[in-house]
Amino acid sequence: RQGKDARVGASSDNKNGFPPAMHLMAMAGIGATTGGISGLFGVGGGSITVPAVALVSDFSHYKVLGTSLAAMILPAMSGVATHHQAGRVVWPVALPLAAGSAIGCYLGGRHVALRVDEDVLRIIFFGLMVGIGGRTF
């Protein structure tokens, strides 16, 4: 869809009032930070990207989620290549895990998320991050 929502850095998408170039730089900075942390700790990029993009934009929670998922394509490919070359991918586990994740992502995004209020999604995301964080100790 074209229009105001399609322009990165448009005033409706940019609550901090950054000029478009600054907005793009902020997004690149978020991406670089997410990639570095993901590479160090193996955390899902969305756990960092979603709150960071939400802080610097006025995107709806639905758009933040979709944008975060799209942004993970290239880093995932790069990470897989790096870990495969080092012999650190257990393909008999990774392939069914990836297939299940793809199916779950499609069903969750297509049939569940759009039926749940944005504020409820934010609360669920918050609870999930707290729960996962608590399990690391």
Image (cartoon, rainbow, N blue to C red):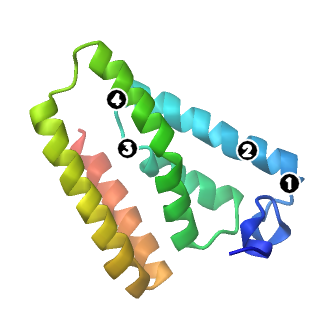
Residue linked to disc 4: 80
Q: Quadrant of residue 128?
A: bottom left
Residue type for callout 2: Ala
Judge by depth and name the residue closer to the eye, 109 or 133.
Answer: 109
Residue linked to disc 2: 26
Do the numbered discs 3 and 1 sit on residues whose CB atoms are within 8 Å? no
Return the disc, 1 or 4, that comes first in the chain's sequence: 1
Residue linked to disc 1: 18
Do the numbered discs 4 and 3 sit on residues whose CB atoms are within 8 Å? no
Do the numbered discs 4 and 2 sit on residues whose CB atoms are within 8 Å? no
Q: Secondary structure at mark 4?
A: helix
Q: CA distance from mark 2 to mark 3?
A: 20 Å
Judge by depth and name the residue closer to the eye, 78 or 134.
Answer: 78
Residue type for callout 1: Phe
Return the disc, 4 or 2, that comes first in the chain's sequence: 2
Quadrant into which the N terminus falls: bottom right
Do the numbered discs 2 and 3 sit on residues whose CB atoms are within 8 Å? no
Residue 44's tag is 3
Q: Residues within 10 Å of mark 2 (few under 14, many from 20)?
A: some
Compared across the picture, whether 4 is left or right of 100 comes to: right
Task: Residue 107 in the image: state x and y as whole percent.
Answer: 28, 72
Q: Secondary structure at mark 1?
A: loop
Q: Secondary structure at mark 3?
A: loop
Compared across the picture, whether 14 is left or right of 65 comes to: right
Task: Residue 28 in the image: state x and y as whole percent.
Answer: 68, 39
Return the disc, 2 or 1, that comes first in the chain's sequence: 1
Q: CA distance from mark 4 to mark 2?
A: 26 Å
